[in-house]
Image (spheres, helix red, strand yellow):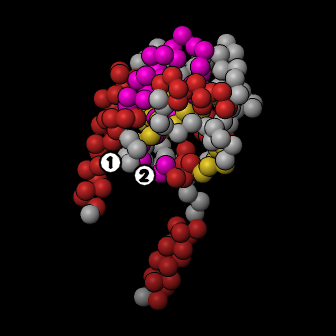
Amino acid sequence: MVAARAAAWLLLAAAACAPREQDFYDFKAVNIRGKLVSLEKYRGSVSLVVNVASECGFTDQHYRALQQLQRDLGPHHFNVLAFPCNQFGQQEPDSNKEIESFARRTYSVSFPMFSKIAVTGTGAHPAFKYLTETSGKEPTWNFWKYLVAPDGKVVGAWDPTVSVEEIRPQVTALVRKLILKKREDL
């Protein structure tokens, strides 16, 4: 009996000490105004992570649709997380301040925006390396979209030819599931 209890205790202790598998919300990023932000603050919400660019052919369509999605579903259960990137066609050449001004002035963007980063290659931001590795899909252009569940796991990835409206049903279903779970937990 004592040996069984000791073995059970050891198993519990080992499980408690085992490293948790890394997820998207374990990373940190600098926001568009230069402040380091733990993505942990978005845990428990659905996130649509997008590499954005101000001078791309996809800019107008995507920014409008992303802002509408944020308006419809956010900010308590959902956020678009925008990461400007200048790696594709040099279509995000401006400073963070200019990028933020453009997005807010032109599209009334209310979702979180982060500082300009690299999303591919050896200099890619660790959060995007995680998104690429876990989804198996690496950005090849601006406006790649990664859907991240409340637990930080990637549940979908789409290239810029897939519109925000096309993925809206999947995003909405994940948000609805989250809301129902939160109600059940009350």
Q: Which mark is residue 164?
A: none
Mark 2, secondary structure of its residue: loop
92 or 172, which is in the foreground? 92
For the residues bearing labels 1 and 2, Cβ distance under 8 angstroms: yes
Identify the amino acid type marked 2: Gly
Res 185 seen here: yes
User: Is residue 119 inside the magenta stretch?
Assistant: no
Identify the amino acid type marked 1: Leu
Tell me if 66 is positioned left or right of 24 in this view.
left
Res 133 seen here: no
Q: Quadrant of residue 46?
A: top left
Question: Residue 43 at x, y = what percent?
Answer: 47, 51
Residue at horizontal 37 percent and vertical 31 percent from the top: 69
Rendered view: 158 above or below 117 = above
For label 2, count other residues whose C-alpha is less than 10 Å away and answer few (under 14), some (14-19) or many (20+). Answer: some
Residue at horizontal 65 percent and vertical 27 percent from the top: 98
Q: Residue furthest front?
A: 105
Q: Residue furthest bottom?
A: 2
Mark 1, secondary structure of its residue: helix
What range of the chain is rendered magenta?
42-69
The C terminus sits in image quarter: bottom left
Rendered view: 80 above or below 120 = below
Q: CA distance from mark 1 to mark 2?
A: 8 Å
Label 2 sits on residue: 44
Q: Which mark is residue 178?
A: 1
